[in-house]
């Protein structure tokens, strides 16, 4: 750096000697404000002139043939705030320009390259606004499946939980606008309470390497973010309208942003979705409609040195559960598995009847940050969330229309962290977080509580660092400690208490004996440690290697500990276990990739060894006078996940591109050397796309998805069938056949006056109307999956 | 700069308040025991009383599940041997024995007979059943019925009570739909 400066000084001083009008040179340098990293590909535009230049890989640019006087420049970079500066030209001039390269709202740390990543060495992928907009009528889980290595656990078509490299539920953190979502992520039928239309950008970190968000993300972290709001006087917005043929409905979503030059902004957004019964190729999937409303407001003042913002969002969803999946007992389940068609098919309707679920989620956040010169940036954040979940079963008599599950989960979090980015080669980050959570299951339901009353306190501290070994190699490391305390009050049926053997191990927590039931007060403390270390190496601008090791521990969630009894909407008895302890994951991952204009690839192998892995599996049936119900029990074992996500693309010409992705994961129970339950099948995706910019940005793409049969699943269980009066094999684990789906998508964009634009898109899902069932759809026992669907999209930018 | 510092102070104040409110909340209502919840209208006992139309002894079939449908214990079934080629007049009784004295749930079924129906399925040495009672609309209810045995051997009698079934129906469970209140199969010996 000093060497260049010397040269520049010589240049500048020489310019005095040879100063001539209109043949001067401006030699500029664009660097990051914090770590002085040169910024490649920044655009320098001379105001009132068509002259435009780019910085080179050392952040340098040259403007020639300049006259003496004042020159106004606009400097922009894809990841930075645009700056306007004036330069006094007096002979050959040198100018050093700093850009604010840190996106305040997202608190991003890594800056070099063209996309900002959340971690240094972890496997990471991003979905941008345009990709998300295609899923506006769908949901987050479906959108995330575009990312290689992400699949989903479904309960029908509207309850979709993401699975990252074979892991889901409490092992995946969802960070919505900087706030960790607390939305009862346990259970297969608890989808994330997220309105995809309120999100502009999604980053997936596979594995727990993003320690600043939590140490228990054994599966990964999903970060939902917003686009950067410009610091200028402007108003802009967009409205999206989707029409969906399968379900005969659609959604509308609109957002508007007003920003001021002083940094103040306000952004509002709302969306509404309504779909009726979905359809399989041969029949209607009765009672699978959905109606959903979401709205959010975000305002604040974002300055370079300090800023604040307030955010509030509301999400309300009402989802029907397939009528045919509401079974009475084990014989109904045997019948359902053995028959091709669902037992109940009614005509199409928009009405959502029981069984159904309804969830309301409020999220409020306040954030403040301040930058201290020569140190770094301090963030303080408080957030409060309330998740209120109702599950309605088919009930009769006086209970008709009454919820059979009513859980209210309230969470408050206070967090502070400081990012120290003043050093050229090293960055540090320290943080502290405190959280208080309360669950209230309303007894008005008249049904024994599946999840008890509890209070939970969490406390966490972390420290992470990044060290730039050379221009090509960066190392990172982090540690985190989390303490959790859970204090529950729960009723157990005495016979269940004894059957579980709790009368011997937990007799000291019994508060009172009410005859057939016991009130107990379990209190558990968990101390969890996590740590991460990795490196990133760039062989060249185009070739990159990453390696990461993460140790992560996750405390059991309330469902894993306390579930007890008949889950009516699933018609199964679910049993947690008070003895369950934290699970510990050791995960090693690597990624090797190349990214050029003509072609690129990525290969991402990983190994995740999870000790005391917590999972639920069918173990048998229990009999009562209401019939026999399948029993699903939580259990711990040592597990191994070994997998790879691979992708390759090729731009054959400027117009034609092909994309190929493959992902596979093998899940093994190491103690018995058998297959784990609910491990996603291998998937192969191939796509071909044609783009012609001259025809209003015309694109058309055909995507093929081949999902292999999951050949590795646990053995089925034998159950006694009262109707058949004998033991029969219940094919509850047998995986359905492989399937192949085609998807077509086309889009055109029309630029209107005053930088307005209209985008029109048409998508066809399941183009061939293929009948299929997916291993990870809980309703696969009862019905085929969705048939063909046409989706017409209109987007208006203004 | 001064302004910024005030904002910062205010934020610090706010965060202190937030912290203390967390602390306060976590200290409160710790000892409030939640309300006890019992499964509503639990049926613990099914009794089928069989009286031969002609001469003979009255028999009873009993299935008893003390911990209800949520408990781990299976119902205990007690049956007596039936006589071959005999028609019995049968009456079914449902009890909730978690209460004392035991509550007779059959009375409730009788009161709301238009919303209930028992279904009987037979196999083996049990030949058939016939309804002998009706609700106000003339549809069968099944609190009383007749049961006919065939030649000696083994057989089963399945008893299902459906709440809000489709009425009238074709006599099969599939057609009737509704919600299952009771389902029990008795394995029987006919001598």
Image (cartoon, grey):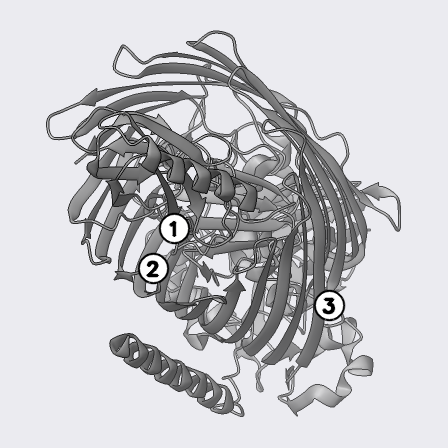
Q: Chain ID for label 3?
A: B
From the image, state whether disc 3 or disc 1 is nearer to you: 1
Tell me if mark 1 has few (under 14), some (14-19) or many (20+) residues whose alpha carbon lies within 10 angstroms of its own: some
Q: Which residue is mark 1?
A: A100
Tell me if mark 3 has few (under 14), some (14-19) or many (20+) residues whose alpha carbon lies within 10 angstroms of its own: some
The percent position of residue A682, horizontal first and vertical second, equals 68, 28
- The residue sitting at the left extreme is A753
Residue at the spot x=69%, y=47% of the render?
A: A469
Q: Quadrant of residue A725?
A: top right
Residue at the spot x=51%, y=37% of the render?
A: A113
Q: Decide if residue A618 is on the left or right side of residue A199.
A: right
Under circle 1, the secondary element is loop
Q: Which residue is mark 3?
A: B73
What number is the disc on residue A304?
A: 2
Q: Chain ID for label 2?
A: A
Give the mark nearer the N terminus: 2 vs 1.
1
Check contact, mark 2 vs mark 1: CB within 8 A: yes
Q: Decide if residue A321 is on the left or right side of residue A467.
A: left
């Amino acid at each position: 750096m000093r060497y260049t400066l010397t040269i520049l000084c010589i240049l500048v001083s020489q310019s005095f000697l040879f100063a001539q009008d209109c043949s001067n040179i401006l030699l500029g340098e664009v660097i990051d404000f914090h770590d002085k990293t040169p910024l490649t590909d920044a655009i320098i535009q001379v105001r009132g002139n068509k002259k435009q230049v780019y910085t080179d890989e050392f952040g340098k640019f040259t403007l020639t043939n300049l006259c003496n006087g004042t020159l106004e420049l606009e400097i922009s970079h894809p990841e930075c705030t645009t700056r306007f500066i004036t330069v006094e030209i007096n002979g050959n001039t040198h100018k050093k320009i700093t850009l604010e390269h840190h996106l305040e709202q997202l608190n991003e740390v890594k800056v070099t390259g063209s996309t900002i990543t959340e971690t240094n060495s972890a496997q990471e992928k991003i979905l941008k606004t345009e990709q998300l907009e295609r899923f506006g009528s769908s949901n987050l889980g479906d959108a995330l499946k575009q990312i290689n290595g992400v699949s989903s656990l479904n309960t029908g078509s509207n309850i979709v939980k993401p699975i990252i490299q074979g892991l889901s539920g409490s092992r995946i953190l969802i960070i919505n606008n900087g706030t960790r979502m607390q939305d009862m992520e346990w259970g297969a039928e608890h989808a994330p309470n997220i309105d995809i239309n309120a999100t502009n950008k999604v980053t997936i970190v596979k594995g727990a390497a993003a320690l600043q968000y939590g140490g228990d993300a054994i599966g990964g972290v999903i970060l939902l973010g917003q686009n950067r709001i410009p610091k200028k006087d402007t108003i802009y917005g967009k409205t999206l309208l989707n029409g969906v043929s399968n379900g005969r409905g659609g959604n509308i979503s609109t957002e508007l942003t007003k920003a001021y030059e002083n940094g103040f902004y306000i952004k509002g957004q709302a969306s509404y979705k309504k779909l009726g019964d979905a359809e399989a190729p041969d029949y209607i999937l009765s009672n699978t409609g959905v109606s959903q409303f979401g709205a959010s407001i975000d305002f604040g003042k974002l300055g370079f040195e300090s800023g604040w913002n307030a955010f509030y969002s509301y999400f309300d969803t009402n989802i029907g559960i397939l009528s045919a999946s509401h079974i009475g007992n084990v014989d109904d389940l045997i019948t359902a598995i053995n028959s091709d068609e669902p037992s109940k098919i009614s005509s199409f309707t928009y009405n959502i009847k029981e069984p159904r679920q309804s969830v309301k989620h409020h999220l409020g956040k306040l954030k403040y940050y301040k930058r201290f010169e020569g140190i770094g940036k301090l963030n303080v954040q408080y957030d409060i969330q309330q998740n209120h979940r109702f599950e309605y079963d088919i009930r009769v008599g006086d209970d008709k229309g009454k919820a059979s599950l009513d859980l209210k989960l309230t969470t408050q979090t206070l967090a502070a962290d400081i990012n120290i980015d003043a050093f050229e080669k090293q960055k540090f980050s320290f943080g502290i977080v405190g959280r208080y959570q309360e669950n209230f299951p309303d007894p008005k339901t008249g049904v024994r509580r599946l999840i008890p009353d509890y209070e939970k306190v969490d406390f966490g501290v972390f420290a992470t660092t990044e060290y730039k070994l050379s221009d090509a190699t960066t190392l990172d490391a982090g540690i985190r400690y989390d303490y959790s305390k859970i204090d529950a009050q729960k009723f157990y049926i005495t016979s269940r208490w004894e059957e579980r053997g709790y009368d011997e191990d937990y007799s000291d927590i019994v508060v009172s004996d009410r005859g057939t039931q016991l009130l107990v007060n379990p209190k558990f403390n968990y101390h969890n440690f996590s740590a991460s270390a990795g490196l990133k190496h760039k062989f060249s601008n185009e070739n990159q290697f990453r390696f990461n090791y993460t140790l992560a521990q996750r405390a059991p969630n309330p469902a894993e500990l306390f579930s007890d009894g008949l889950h009516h909407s699933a018609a199964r008895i679910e049993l947690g276990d008070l003895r369950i302890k934290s699970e510990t994951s050791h995960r090693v991952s690597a990624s090797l990739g190349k990214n050029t204009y003509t072609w690129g690839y990525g290969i991402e192998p990983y190994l995740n060894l999870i000790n005391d892995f917590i999972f639920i599996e069918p173990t048998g049936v229990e009999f009562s006078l209401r019939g026999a119900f399948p029993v699903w029990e939580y259990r711990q074992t040592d597990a191994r996940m070994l997998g790879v996500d691979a992708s390759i693309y090729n731009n054959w010409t400027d117009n034609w591109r092909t994309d190929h992705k493959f992902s596979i994961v093998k899940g093994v129970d190491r103690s018995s050397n058998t297959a784990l339950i609910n491990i996603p099948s291998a998937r192969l995706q191939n796509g071909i796309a044609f783009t012609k910019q001259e025809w209003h940005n015309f694109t058309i793409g055909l995507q093929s998805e081949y999902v292999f049969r999951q050949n590795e699943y646990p053995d089925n269980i034998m159950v006694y069938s009262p109707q058949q009066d004998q033991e029969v094999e219940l094919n509850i684990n047998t995986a359905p056949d492989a399937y192949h789906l085609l998807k077509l998508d086309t889009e055109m964009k029309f630029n209107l006056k005053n930088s307005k634009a209209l985008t029109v898109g048409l998508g066809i899902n399941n183009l061939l109307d293929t009948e299929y069932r997916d291993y990870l759809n809980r309703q696969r026992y009862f019905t085929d999956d969705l048939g063909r669907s046409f989706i017409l999209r209109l987007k208006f930018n203004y | 700069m001064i302004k910024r510092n005030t904002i910062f102070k205010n934020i610090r104040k706010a965060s202190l308040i937030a912290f203390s409110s967390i602390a306060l909340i976590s200290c409160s209502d710790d000892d409030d025991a939640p309300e006890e919840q019992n499964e509503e209208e639990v049926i613990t006992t099914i009794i089928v009383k069989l009286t031969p139309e002609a001469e003979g002894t009255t028999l009873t079939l009993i299935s008893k599940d003390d911990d209800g449908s949520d408990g781990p214990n299976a119902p205990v079934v007690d049956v007596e041997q039936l006589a071959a080629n005999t028609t019995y007049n049968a009456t079914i009784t449902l009890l909730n024995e978690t209460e004392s004295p035991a509550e007779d749930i059959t009375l409730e079924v009788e009161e709301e007979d238009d919303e209930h129906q028992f279904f009987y399925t037979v196999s083996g040495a049990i030949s058939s059943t016939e309804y002998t009672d009706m609700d106000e609309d003339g549809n069968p209810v099944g609190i009383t019925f007749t049961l006919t045995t065939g030649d000696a051997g083994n057989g089963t009698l399945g008893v299902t009570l459906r709440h809000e079934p489709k009425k009238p129906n074709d006599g099969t469970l599939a057609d009737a739909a509704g919600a299952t209140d009771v389902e029990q199969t008795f394995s029987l010996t006919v001598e």
